[in-house]
Each structure stands twice: as structure tokens, then as C-alpha cells.
Amino acid sequence: MKDHTPYQERLKRMPDFVVEYEIDLCEELKEIKLEQGMRIDFLYDGDDPQVEGVHMIWPELLDEKNEIALEVTQGNIAKKGKANMWVVDEARRPYHAKRIKIGTKGIWWRGGRIAYVTVVNNEGLKC
């Protein structure tokens, strides 16, 4: 078993926001195995991925104690839970700070829907 290195250690900052998620794979992705450290993107609810595009905001899954899940075994993630979210491109953080509010809805995306998410904390994006 390989352990996940928390993004906070790598990036030397706090996560940008936190979401509650519910995995709901679209038909085309039903067979994928999700894992901690997955590189999936974020789509704001109501945005069209072909028009507004998707955003490089990566999740970091939390366990039932709201601590970073360190295990990275494929397919071993909860159907529902919380995740820290990390805006990958530092230059895009101000854009997302304007859009991300508590209650903002979005979708984890990888060429199709992975999960529905709702923002529950946006402290990391506040100036």
C-alpha cells in the first residue's frame, strides 16, 4: 500500500475550499476506479464544459474524521464524503474566489461526470 502525501505539505498552504461530494459516475465512466490523488477537474453547476470549460481544481479526500485520507488504493473511496479542493493554477485563484461561495454546486469531471459536489467551506480563497 502506497500513502498519499498531503497537498498542504507539497504546496505549503491551506486548501482553497472544501466540498461535500457524492460519487455518481456517468454511464461512460462506470468502470473507472477512483482513488486518493486522482487528477479530475471541476465544473461549476450550470456551466457547459464545451463553452466555459472545466477547471484544474483537484480534490483531496477526507476520511470520516475529516482528516486527509492517506491510503491510495484504487476503488477504495467512500460514495459520499468531504474533500479539500486545490486550485492548481495559482493565477486562477482570484477568479475562483469570486465564484466559490458556501453552497456553490459543481461537478467533478473527467470527460464526464464523476460526482456532484457542494462547497461547505471557502476559507482558503478569502483574502
Image (tube, rainbow, N blue to C red):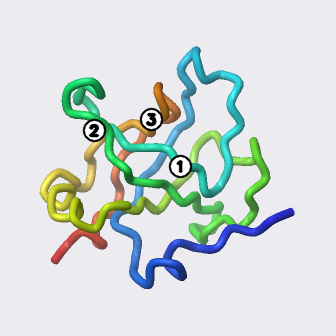
- Residue farthest along the right direction in this orientation: 1
State the residue position of label 3: 109
Q: Earlier in the sequence, mark 3 or mark 2?
A: 2
Q: Is residue 124 above or below residue 22?
A: below
**Amino acid at the residue labelled 1:** Arg
Circles 3 and 2 in contact, beta carbons < 8 Å: no
**Amino acid at the residue labelled 2:** Tyr
Closer to the observer: label 2 or label 1? Answer: 1
- Residue farthest along the top direction in this orientation: 27
**Crowding near the residue tagged with mark 1, few <14, some 14–19, many ≥20 C-alpha atoms within 10 Å:** some
State the residue position of label 2: 44
The structure residue drawn at horizontal position 65% and vertical position 22%, both measured from the top left corner, is: 30
Viewer-proximal residue among 56 and 115: 56
The structure residue drawn at horizontal position 64% and vertical position 61%, both measured from the top left corner, is: 64
Q: Is residue 10 left or right of residue 68?
A: left
State the residue position of label 1: 39
The structure residue drawn at horizontal position 53% and vertical position 20%, both measured from the top left corner, is: 26
**Amino acid at the residue labelled 3:** Trp
Q: Is residue 125 left or right of residue 72?
A: left
**Crowding near the residue tagged with mark 3, few <14, some 14–19, many ≥20 C-alpha atoms within 10 Å:** many
